[in-house]
Amino acid sequence: MQRVYLDYNATAPLRSEARDAMIAAMEVMGNPSSVHAEGRAAKAIVEKARAQVADAMGASGADVIFTSSATEAAALALAGRSLHGAAVEHDAVGSWVDDSLPVDADGRVRVEDPSRSVLQLANSETGVMQSLPEGLALSDMTQAFGKVPVAFSWSGAQMALISAHKLGGPKGIGALVVRQGVDVPAQIKGGGQEMGRRSGTENVIGIAGFGAAAAAAQRDLETGVWSRVEEFRNILEITLEDRFKEIIFVGKGASRLPNTACFIAPGWKGETQVMQMDLAGFAVSAGSACSSGKVRASRVLTAMGYDEALASQAIRVSIGPATTEEDIARFADTWAAKYEKIRAKAA
């Protein structure tokens, strides 16, 4: 059975450019903090990747601080701060802020005090994108970076979180992007690496892969790859909607990521859908990968006004550049056949 991967928002397949950059970095033995030739060679890899990430982020003049993940970047940015957020934020951010910002039925968030608030650029479960207000304290750009054009310098945010593996880089490397002059006290202290904000010898291999993936993702955006992805996502939604009028497409009235379809199939538990589709050869999700193993209704969907029953009957299909129209057709046919059986039993 040939499997079809439709869970890009959880993690994207490793890009060949990232793999090649990592293999090359493995041959460099130096510590980037050392002043000899070997150390300078390692430092050059780190700084090249920092420039690649900053360029892809539209972050001219900002500091790119490498961390082990976007989750660590969130902790670095948010520890010691008292900020407002919404219930649609990823747990990596939501764990540090309150849930006081209101969310409408399409998943859009209203921010009244930007300097005291955080707001994701795109939601990992629904794909719903937000308009960032000027002076925003922090934005989680992890899902948007690499899928849509991002310009941190124009975003209005003071800080942003990103992660390599969401755009085809390696797992275990992320970054905090900070406007120069914004105070970010170190949480991991020691040798003063990463401009004194995050001590510890840099993960040269992972950083090299991050930089290469960011550059490749930028090329994809410039050549229209994600426009084709959006066409395939739309084909999937139209196909299912034509067959089942009761399906609810979450956030369809808002601007969304081009690759994300979150939909509710009344009467069919999301976790059951994921398991049955997995057995049929398709990788999909019932929500954020960081919380999908927990049996509970999505707090993102309940924040949007869906009751717990409906919120627990949703799945997310997130596709990418390697997804084909045949993959979409196979998934739609397989999913529809299984849902027909569910509906027949309930009749």
Image: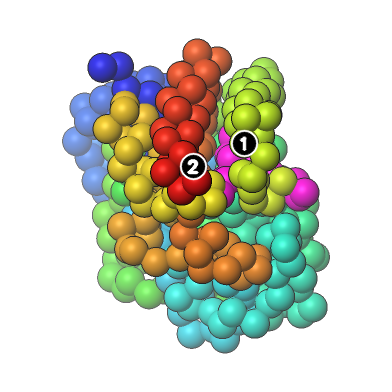
Give how far across and how far down residue 273 sits, in percent.
39, 43
Give how far across and how far down residue 70 sits, in percent.
44, 57
Q: Amino acid at mark 2?
A: Arg
In-front residue for pair 228/199: 228
Which residue is at 36% across, 30% downward?
282
Which residue is at 31% across, 28% downward?
280
In-front residue for pair 92/307: 307
Residue 180 in sight here: no
| Horizontal side, residue 24 vs residue 269: left or right | left
Work out which residue is located at the far front of the displayed protein and give it.
Answer: 347
Residue 277 drawn in magenta:
no
Residue 260 drawn in magenta:
yes
| Residue 244 circle label | 1
Give how far across and how far down residue 227 sits, in percent.
69, 24
* Residue at the spot of label 2: 343
Structure colour scheme: rainbow
Q: Are marks 1 and 2 in contact (CB under 8 Å)?
A: yes
Give how far across and how far down residue 160 sits, in percent.
59, 58
Determine the CA span between mark 1 and mark 2.
Answer: 10 Å
| Horizontal side, residue 285 vs residue 239: left or right | left
Residue 256 sits in which quadrant? top right
Mark nearest the camera among 1 and 2 is 2
